[in-house]
Image: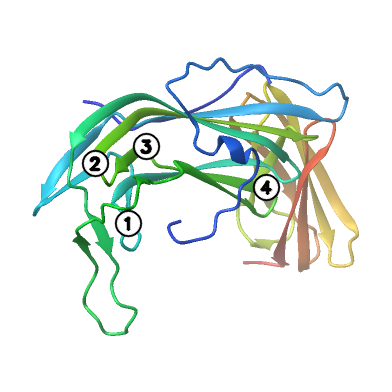
Amino acid sequence: FLLFSIAFYFIIGYDGLPWSSVRSPSRRYGKQGDDVTYVTSHIESSTLETNTKVVTVDCSNYQTKAIDTYDVVSIDGFDLSKKQSKPVVPVKQIRMNIPLNATVDNIDVTFTNANTLGDLNIPAYQLPPPMPGEDFEGEYIDCSNDLGVYPPVQYAEKNSEMVGYQTLDVRIYPLIYDTALKQATIYQNVSIQVTYTTPNQGFVQNFTPDKRDYSISKPIITTTEIENTSGGAVDFSATVQVKDLAGNVISSKTGSKSIASNSTGEIGVNLITPGQSGLYRLVCTASDGVNTIGTSMQDIDVETSR
């Protein structure tokens, strides 16, 4: 049997919510049926690097189910788009993490391996009324035949800043439906190519001490999780400091690890708690060897005995 799969790799280099276009509005419909070879470009600079990140989505495991008088097409791993009075079609949101200071230069989505499904009576959706206490959960209704080809745009992007990194969400619609002819076509393969420029080669996903409450002169075990977003292996480091609340450094230790391209690795750094009870702060500073890629802090409480 076929499984829905998403593959991430590098090449040398919701409903109803507003989605912001990042780049290349003329390419928003994607390319259909073209074979594309991707290569990487590098900016001639010692501090900036352009990377190309690609996600491939297998949409071939689909099925058509008869519900009452309607034909509902679903794809394993996909949701169904349920917008008011619009055709019900499969939809998937793909999320990619990139460095916080990265600039997205281009997003290119390619739909290939088209298969015509023939005449289908795909329903539209009736949303429930916005009244408290109503049990009505929405229902399938007849789809109007004057909506043209739906969806009019097969993908949309949204960029959001998180703590220490940013996310790029790409929502894809592999199936298009001609509401006048009642003809449906599904693209069984989707490729998403994102090109971005950043001075950093990764970002900190998480910084975690083993606990928050300690006894004096006891081990502090910390883990710094780093994602390498560059096109090659990078030696990352994490320096963890124990500071008092005035900002004075009590102790410090550095760990390092080589992390492969498009992979996540953990750097473990162990310290000893201060010999005096009180409130302290753990400060982790991570580096890719050239730039600081993230700083995280965690307050801890040290007591004489626990």
Q: CA distance from mark 1 to mark 2?
A: 15 Å
Quickly name the residue at label 2. Answer: 181
Density class for disc 1 (Cα within 10 Å; few <14, some 14-19, many ≥20) is many
Q: Position of residue 117 (x, y in %)?
A: 21, 32
Mark sitting on residue 174: 3
Horizontally, is 264 left or right of 281 in the view? left
Q: Position of residue 112 (x, y in %)?
A: 40, 24
**What's the residue type where badge 3 is placed?**
Pro
Q: In the figure, 93 relative to 162: above or below?
A: above
Q: CA distance from mark 1 to mark 3?
A: 16 Å
Q: In the figure, 121 relative to 201: above or below?
A: below
Horizontally, is 53 left or right of 149 in the view? right
Q: In the figure, 236 relative to 91: above or below?
A: above
**What's the residue type where badge 4 is placed?**
Tyr
Mark sitting on residue 86: 1
What residue is at 9 percent from the left and 52 percent from the top?
69
Q: Are marks 1 and 3 in contact (CB under 8 Å)?
A: no
| Quadrant of the drawing holding the C terminus | bottom right
Mark closest to the chain's N terminus, 2 or 3: 3
**What's the residue type where badge 2 is placed?**
Leu
Quick check: can you spot residue 223?
no
